[in-house]
Amino acid sequence: MSTIISPSMLSADFLNLGDDVKMVNKSQADWIHLDIMDGTFVPNLSYGLPIVEHIKKLATKTLDVHLMIVQPEKYIEAFHKAGADILTVHIEATTHLHRCIQQIKALGMKAGVALNPQTPINQLEDIIQDIDLVLIMSVNPGFGGQSFITHAVEKVRKLKQLIEQTHSDCLIEVDGGVNLETGQLLVEAGADALVAGSFVFNSQNPPSTIEKLSRLSSTSTVSTETD
Ligand code: DX5
Ligand code: ZN
């Protein structure tokens, strides 16, 4: 089974965003990852609803929206209207996570929960049956191009165990510092989906880089060649 790849548009060329969306459309990517930052939950601002709406008009792939904002429940409906297919909220950003998940699912979107690097997997025990995806952060959220925190691999293993024990069908996605080497470790540990921003968009040949990432499997041999 191939790995789901979700290129992060945070590293795209914003003066030619349409061209980068078309590139992702034509590539082996399954999803498009959109990072929404509020300057409070994370020390950075990115882009908001109008950009998501424009990308939706052009994108032929699943919109995988990662909310790095406080009180995400206030914006669930707005991101649904803007075109999100998967809506992921941070466990650290809302007091009423369960209600938030129910709201996302009631609108027909897939519901994801993201975990910062210091947040343990056991905090998911009472929500794992209700969610479609867990997003494990392998960097501190807020910026592209940071180094991979290797402890994320162990967290993927623990999460995989929890999913198996509870017979949940939730997917494991990992975000931050993903390249062919770290991606291989993550897939071996049980990751189903990988977000990659700078590794894809800073490469000479982004479609080929996406294809190489998508070919990673728990039995593949690592090729560290980049294009
Ligand atoms: C970080 C974002 C990531 C970011 C990943 O806060 O959530 O999606 O774009 O960028 P890379 O792949 O460059 O680490
Ligand atoms: Zn992200």
Image (tube, rainbow, N blue to C red):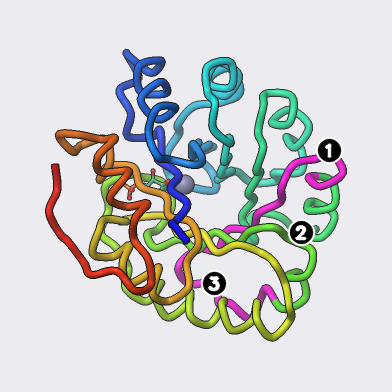
Q: Position of residue 125 (x, y in %)?
A: 72, 78
Q: Amino acid at mark 3?
A: Thr
Q: Amino acid at mark 1?
A: Leu
39 to 110, vertically: above or below: above
Q: Is mark 1 within 8 Å of ligand 2?
A: no
- Select label 1 or label 3 by which is in front: 1
**Mark 2 → mark 3, Cα distance in angstroms:** 15 Å
Along the polypeptide, which appears first: circle 1 or circle 3? 1
Identify the element where label 1 is drawn. loop
Q: Position of residue 217 (x, y in %)?
A: 37, 66
Q: Say how many tags the image has.
A: 3
**Mark 1 → mark 3, Cα distance in angstroms:** 28 Å
Q: Which residue is mark 3?
A: 119
Q: Residue at x 58, y 58 (%)?
A: 114
The boundaries of the magenta stretch are 104-124
Q: Residue at x 61, y 19 (%)?
A: 53
* Label annotation for residue 97: 2
Q: Is mark 3 within 8 Å of ligand 1?
A: no
Along the polypeptide, which appears first: circle 1 or circle 2? 2
Along the polypeptide, which appears first: circle 2 or circle 3? 2
Q: Which residue is mark 1?
A: 107
